[in-house]
């Protein structure tokens, strides 16, 4: 009850009559009419969080939990009665308990209790002997008549009452002893309990499932986390190993290039020294020697200079500093993991690149034409990777200010697919450049012809087969058959001896039709076309 009073502390709600803190008159419990006009107050149970509406009497009018009070009494008794005071004098600590009166008594009141004739034969029990008891509660007294114990039950009001209540407020109400009506009311409560217990079991089962799933979830999370850690640690080790390989490869490239440069340097230095010696000796001879000395030494000098002039050497560097790292390039597997990143020392050489494709020098108007560019290095080897700056331009010779839109697709393997769609027939010039340098074969010309004319006829072996034996069906090959057949047939006059088009007579299935469709064309030819 004290906790409930605390819940309402500071809320502005007063439980007794008198004056509110602000000085305004507050309603008294003796004024039910004015009290009923106020809005009903609800509080939340601190245990189950259920909302409870306060009765008109406030917190003190709430139903008392006598079982809880009994438990509190038992806990106090188990603690040697510390904190309990006498129920009669309310001053001294409890020493004994009257089992008849259900009262806790101090030593003085216990002596007085035994001297009175009415209570002298009551059973008195020491507190230490009550520790094994399950119930030691006091008699439940009537709140309206504190001297009377609640022994009766009013059926109309559905609440326990005392003897004074049935002759006063509950006069003419049907009532009976609590021991007589407990079976009926207890059975109704048990019936409700039976309906509630399945819900409890269902909720417990649901909570058990939640606990089980949560436990499984935690285990699964830990297992997946372990997998992630294992994968990450393995991947990190693979990346570190791949990094070390790349760094070693880079260092090997450095050593190789440095050795090549040093070798070329030594060769050029030696050759330069020989050249300077020959040049200086010859210049000294020509400037300081006499005519006879020059003529005597001429043969040796000429032979030496001729040998020096015949020495083959290249002033072009044998190696370069072109080293790049391609992080997007696949580098195979390391420790079972796919790794990326490769060191590339190749440099594309436009003069070694190759253009190829069927549409390299021919195209049709309004039809997409394409060709392929294969990029190679100075040694003629495929680059094996993409990423080069390929520039393509397709321009009509007579309209240089109207270039055709081109699309360059990087195949990521050193090849590039180039496509464009010319809008008009004519001659076009195609430029293909890498780093603003023309590739091998660029620029070149493309002849764009008019749009390809499809065949309106059928590609058949003979007219007899394709028309289903119709006599009036004809073929552009001009062949006929005996018996009035106007079309060609196998082994008969005019048959070309191989499959051909019925509309124009061409032998190539994928070819342009030359049939003009003029008025002089036989009408029966259209039948074959339709078939």
Image (tube, rainbow, N blue to C red):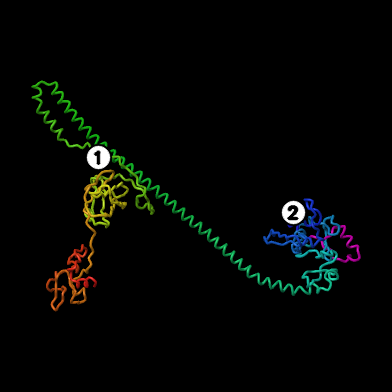
Name the quarter where the C terminus is drawn: bottom left
**Camera-side residue: 280 or 326?**
326
Q: Residue at x 68, y 71 (%)?
A: 192
Mark 2 element type: loop
**Camera-side residue: 334 or 512?**
512
Name the quarter where the N terminus is drawn: bottom right
Residue beneath disc 2 = 12
Q: Is residue 509 magenta?
A: no
- Residue furthest toward the bottom? 483
Q: Is residue 306 left or right of residue 121?
A: left
N-terminal of the two: label 1 or label 2? 2
As drawn, 295 above or below 510: above
Residue beneath disc 1 = 318
**Camera-side residue: 88 or 467?**
467
Q: Is residue 124 magenta?
A: yes
Is there any visible trace of residue 132 in the rendered image? no
């Amino acid at each position: 009850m004290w906790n409930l009073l605390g819940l309402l502390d500071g809320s502005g709600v007063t439980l007794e009559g008198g004056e509110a803190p602000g000085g305004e008159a507050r309603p008294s419990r003796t004024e039910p009419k004015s009290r009923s006009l106020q809005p009903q107050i609800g509080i939340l149970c601190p245990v189950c969080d259920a909302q409870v509406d306060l009765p008109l009497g406030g917190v003190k009018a709430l139903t008392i939990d006598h079982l809880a009070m009994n438990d509190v009494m038992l806990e106090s008794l188990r603690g040697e009665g510390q904190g309990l005071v006498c129920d009669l004098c309310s001053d001294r600590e409890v020493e004994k308990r009257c089992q008849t009166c259900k009262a806790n008594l101090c030593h003085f009141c216990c002596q007085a209790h035994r001297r009175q004739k009415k209570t002298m034969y009551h059973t008195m029990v020491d507190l230490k002997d009550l520790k094994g008891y399950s119930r030691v509660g006091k008699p439940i007294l009537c709140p309206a008549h504190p001297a009377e114990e609640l022994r009766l039950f009013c059926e109309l009001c559905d609440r326990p009452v005392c003897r004074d209540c049935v002759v006063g407020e509950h006069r003419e109400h049907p009532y009976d002893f609590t021991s007589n009506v407990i079976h009926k009311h207890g059975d109704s409560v048990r019936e409700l309990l039976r309906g509630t217990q399945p819900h409890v079991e269902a909720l417990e089962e649901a909570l058990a499932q939640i606990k089980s799933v949560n436990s499984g979830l935690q285990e699964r999370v830990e297992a997946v986390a372990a997998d992630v850690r294992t994968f990450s640690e393995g991947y990190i080790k693979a990346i570190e190993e791949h990094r070390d390989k790349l760094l070693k490869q880079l260092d090997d490239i450095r050593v190789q290039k440095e050795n090549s440069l040093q070798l070329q340097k030594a060769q050029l230095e030696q050759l330069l020294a020989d050249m300077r010696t020959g040049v200086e000796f010859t210049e000294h001879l020509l400037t300081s020697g006499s005519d006879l000395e020059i003529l005597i030494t001429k043969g040796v000098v000429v032979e030496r200079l001729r040998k020096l002039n015949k020495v083959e050497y290249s002033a072009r560097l044998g190696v370069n500093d072109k080293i790049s790292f391609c992080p997007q390039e696949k580098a195979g597997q390391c420790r079972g993991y796919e790794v990326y990143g490769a060191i590339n020392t190749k440099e594309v050489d436009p003069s070694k690149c190759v253009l190829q494709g069927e549409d390299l020098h021919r195209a049709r108007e309004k039809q997409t034409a394409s060709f392929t560019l294969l990029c190679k290095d100075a040694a003629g080897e495929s680059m094996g990777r993409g990423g080069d700056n390929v520039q393509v331009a397709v321009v009509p010779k007579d309209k240089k200010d109207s270039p055709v839109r081109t699309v360059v697709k990087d195949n990521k393997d050193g090849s590039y697919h180039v496509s464009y769609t010319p809008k008009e027939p004519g001659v076009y010039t195609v430029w293909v450049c890498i780093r603003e340098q023309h590739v091998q074969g660029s620029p070149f010309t493309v002849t764009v012809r008019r749009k390809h004319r499809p065949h309106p006829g059928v590609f058949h072996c003979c007219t007899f087969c394709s028309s289903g034996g119709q006599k009036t069906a004809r073929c552009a090959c001009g062949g006929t058959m005996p018996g009035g057949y106007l079309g060609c047939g196998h082994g008969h006059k005019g048959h070309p001896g191989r499959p051909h088009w019925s509309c124009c007579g061409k032998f190539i299935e994928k070819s342009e039709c030359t049939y003009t469709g003029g008025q002089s064309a036989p009408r029966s030819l259209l039948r074959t076309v339709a078939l």
